[in-house]
Image (tube, coloured by chain):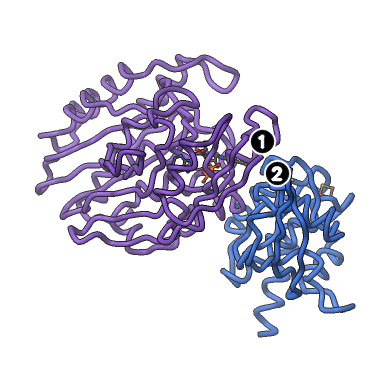
Amino acid sequence: MSKIHVTTVVNGDEVEFLADPRETLLDCLRDHLGLTGSKEGCGTGDCGACSVTVDGVLVSSCLMLGVEAQGKRIATIEGMANGEELHPLQRQFVEHAALQCGFCTPGILVAAKALLEKNPDPTETEVRYWLAGNLCRCTGYDKIIRAVMDAASEMRGAA
Amino acid sequence: MDFHTPSSFEDASKRAAEATGLTRFLAGGTDVLVQMRSGTVLPDTLIDLKHIPGTQDITRTPDGGWRIGIAVSGARLGDHADLVADWPGVVEGMELVGSTQVQGRATLVGNLCNGSPAADSVPGLVAAQASVEITGLTGVRTVPVEDIPAGPGKTTLSPGDVISGILIPPRGAHGGDAYQRFTPRTEMDIAVAGCAISLRVDGDTITEARVAVGAVAPTVRLVPDAAAALIGSTLDDTAIDALVTAVRAACNPIDDKRGTAEFRTDVAGVLAKRVAHIAYSRAKGDAQ
Ligand SMILES: Cc1cc2nc3c(=O)[nH]c(=O)nc-3n(C[C@H](O)[C@H](O)[C@H](O)COP(=O)(O)OP(=O)(O)OC[C@H]3O[C@@H](n4cnc5c(N)ncnc54)[C@H](O)[C@@H]3O)c2cc1C
Ligand code: FES
Ligand code: FES
């Protein structure tokens, strides 16, 4: 099978890779670009561990082909902190101990960031619905929701 | 696997007709990629339709209806205030599909062509009397949505047929529609039963109605007897009873771990009643 040359922008940097057209965007991020922050929990769209944004839209990178990334702008967890400075969501997750094994965390952070860009002042119910596609087997969700709510209010205060 | 990105529906149709082996179109990919991953469908040819101009657009047609591009995601549909105002039931059906992440990709056309009897957006489209424009080898034709599903995972489309747009009629005055489903979990679950109703009123009297059910038969089904129960009524108890009876009579569901046939049939009736009330108050302009 011939591979396809893909040029795309990931976290602001132009990158290129050769993809087998059957490979998912998640495979390409992890195996061709070495960006292993996005996780594969299921590979079938159920868990959200592979969440990234494509042209600003939250998607599961396991449900998109790498070749479909041609000409798009991708944002992953690796682009969330500003150098050593954590994003308020990341900091609140640490402060609230909103993670245990951490496998779900990159996906949840990317998803929560997309929510706060669309809705800076969500209700708890809105946060829970938005994150319904992000599964966590450890925390019981409560600390995650509280961390997102606190990050939202911190970011509103800072603005 | 061959991967194509045609720039016109004519080209997509030709490529699909010429391809040998298993062929799939790629809209949002939320069914196709899951099937590839599980190994149930391993296409030899994949035709990505998203490079065709207009596939991302929602446009009002000259008659006041809507044309929805085949690559418009659920999220984009939900963000379109004018479409939501006209056809809230169509949009709420699509918005029930999957998570936020799935909403970023999943499309109406993919939901329809995947052929699931439980496809959440299809009852709303059928109730709205929506149709699809099909580009095939012999030209372009328009077909009612309810004529597309042929059974679980099957459609009436022929090789070389590609859906090139979804057409929703003008809403017109005093109309309302709604869709509800029952699932064991509130989010991220597959319908055990679903019902959509679109109707029009003149004062308090229902003058037009279409009723469609999902997940209770091998395909989404239009139920003319249920519509007949509503037309001419003011949604009084007699009309509701007749609606519920007609909906249950149209059910021929499977029995599985997610719901017995008896339960699915019963719930379809309950949903029909609730959905009729919502569609009726939307038609009358009451806030809902
Ligand atoms: C986690 C998860 C949750 C889900 N939850 C739900 C749910 O709650 N309710 C529900 O109904 N569905 C659900 N789905 C299924 C799926 O998301 C929907 O069916 C979706 O609408 C499919 O659209 P798509 O654009 O992704 O389709 P695709 O995967 O791109 O295509 C699906 C099928 O349609 C065909 N096709 C696509 N475009 C065309 C065209 N223009 N002409 C002819 N054929 C075409 C393809 O060949 C393929 O067979 C879920 C899926 C996932 C992964
Ligand atoms: S790995 Fe993509 S949703 Fe689970
Ligand atoms: S912290 Fe382990 S899955 Fe969420």
Tell whether B13 sits left or right of A12: left
Dot label at residue A22: 2
Point out the image quarter for the C terminus of chain A: bottom right
Point out the image quarter for the N terminus of chain A: top right
Q: CA distance from mark 2 to mark 1?
A: 8 Å
Tell whether B140 sits left or right of A16: left
Residue at left offset 40%, top offset 55%? B69
Specify whether residue B249 is in view.
yes
Badge 2 density bin: few <14, some 14–19, many ≥20, Cα 10 Å: many
Residue at left offset 66%, top offset 60%? A69
Q: Nearer the viewer, residue A136 or B254?
A: B254
- What amino acid is labelled 2 in the image? Arg
Q: Chain of mark 1?
A: B
In the rendered image, which residue does mark 1 sit on?
Answer: B36
- What amino acid is labelled 1 in the image? Met
Tell whether A69 sits left or right of B169: right
Badge 1 density bin: few <14, some 14–19, many ≥20, Cα 10 Å: some
Dot label at residue B134: none
Residue B81 place in picture, x, y as percent? 37, 64
Q: Secondary structure at mark 1?
A: helix
Q: Nearer the viewer, residue A105 or A71?
A: A71
Query: Looking at the image, is mark 2 or mark 1 nearer the viewer?
Result: 2
Q: Quadrant of residue B86?
A: bottom left
Residue at left offset 57%, top offset 49%? B4
Q: Give me the chain that's purple.
A: B
Specify whether residue A143 is in view.
no
**Tag 2 near tag 1, CB within 8 Å:** yes
User: Is the CB of the residue bearing disc 1 within 8 angstroms of ligand 1?
Assistant: no
Find chain A in the image and tell me its colour.
blue
Instruction: Work out whether disc 2 and disc 1 sit on a shared chain.
Output: no
Residue at left offset 14%, top offset 34%? B231
